[in-house]
Image (cartoon, rainbow, N blue to C red):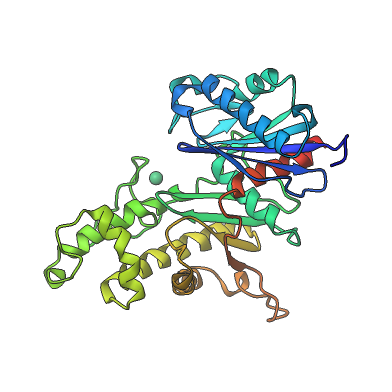
Amino acid sequence: MAENANYFAGLDIGGSTVKTVLVDELGEVAGEMVEVRSHVKDGFNATFGQLESALDQLTSAIGVGREAVKGIGMDVPAPSCDGVIWGRANLAEDWVGTNVRDRLSERLGGTPIYMTNDGNAAALGEYAVRRKHHGGLLLVSPGTGLGGGLVLPGGRAYEGANGLALEVGHISVPHREDDGELPQCSCGLHGCLEAWVSLVALRRRIGIELAKDENKGHPLNDGTSLEEKAFRLRDFAQEGDELAIWLFRQQAQILGHGIADLVRVFDPGLVVLGGGLAETEGFRDDYLGWVMEGFEERAWPIYLQSPIDPEQKTTRFEWAIGGDSSAALGVAFSAREMFR
Ligand SMILES: [Zn+2]
């Protein structure tokens, strides 16, 4: 270990855990990820204490002091601008309105900090692990909700004027339930993309479909909770169950519609699908195929391949590869870019 080496830390502050990593000046990961239980609900000071102890663990594991950390990237599960969090989400009340970025920087003796939200951090992570990719990157992550982020060519996240950009889950889609209504979203609006493409949406859709006469005899109509049914739905789909396949296919196609509109606005060149909904290896090809059906329905051919050279793809699709430490790595890389 070089004595005067500089390091950059990534702190991914989630609602349930805080994941932290170190990278060196060359962008190589130094040591192992340190993960601690999140205390964000106990306020930011409680969390800062945890972050300090995680930083000590990270640095002592590679035999350097905390002063070797020359910059920090940090992401929070809430919209924020210039170090100030705008909304609570999973956080305690005291996080909102205080410049938590500057408070933490002061507490750490002036170490500069870059702060962003978790969607941007995850997109930055996918960018960071693709060492040979230098174009844009749009991340779309169907999980409990529908998150996303956009990295511009060169590696900066596009955050918008107020840190409110890339709320991809809440663009509107025209799809209606059988009763003609636009489904209600977790944000309170009706007709959001997330209201079709998320685990929460999947549970609602399962409930609606299983209540239909033609599905009364379906094995999922066994009195278990919608959570449980949604959990088992992937197995059913993989075994060829028609209803399960239809539910996923409909959802993936609508996701493809949404992605087509986002691609038409941002032209990112690379779309990365993340999130927990379709993470099973064997299921991914099917799911991506359905996403592409929807995408091709809405996107003009020029968004798939060059009109000059048909071999050249204008939009590529890939699965997320960053894993658990992706967001922490993403903000660590950004800190390295900004503060080295
Ligand atoms: Zn919404």
Regarding residue 326, the answer to whether it shows in the image is yes
User: Depth check: 326 or 206 in front?
Assistant: 326
Q: Residue at x 70, y 33 (%)?
A: 72
User: Depth check: 143 or 219 in front?
Assistant: 219
Q: How far across and how far down the image is residue 61, in percent? A: 70, 38
**Vertical comparison of 264 with 188: above or below:** below
**Vertical comparison of 335 with 52: above or below:** below
Name the residue furthest bottom. Answer: 310
Residue 120 placement: quadrant: top right
Regarding residue 97, the answer to whether it shows in the image is no
**Vertical comparison of 190 with 224: above or below:** above
User: Depth check: 107 or 150 in front?
Assistant: 107
**Vertical comparison of 19 with 206: above or below:** above
Q: How far across and how far down the image is residue 245, in percent? A: 33, 72
Give the quarter the ligand 1 occupies.
top left
Which image quarter is the N terminus in? top right
Q: Residue at x 70, y 21 (%)?
A: 108
User: Depth check: 250 or 174 in front?
Assistant: 250
Q: Residue at x 17, y 71 (%)?
A: 218
Q: How far across and how far down the image is residue 63, in percent? A: 77, 36
Q: Say whether residue 281 is left or right of residue 117.
A: left
Which image quarter is the C terminus in? top right
Q: How many marks?
A: 0
Q: How far across and how far down the image is residue 20, in percent? A: 62, 39
Q: Say whether residue 123 is left or right of residue 62.
A: left
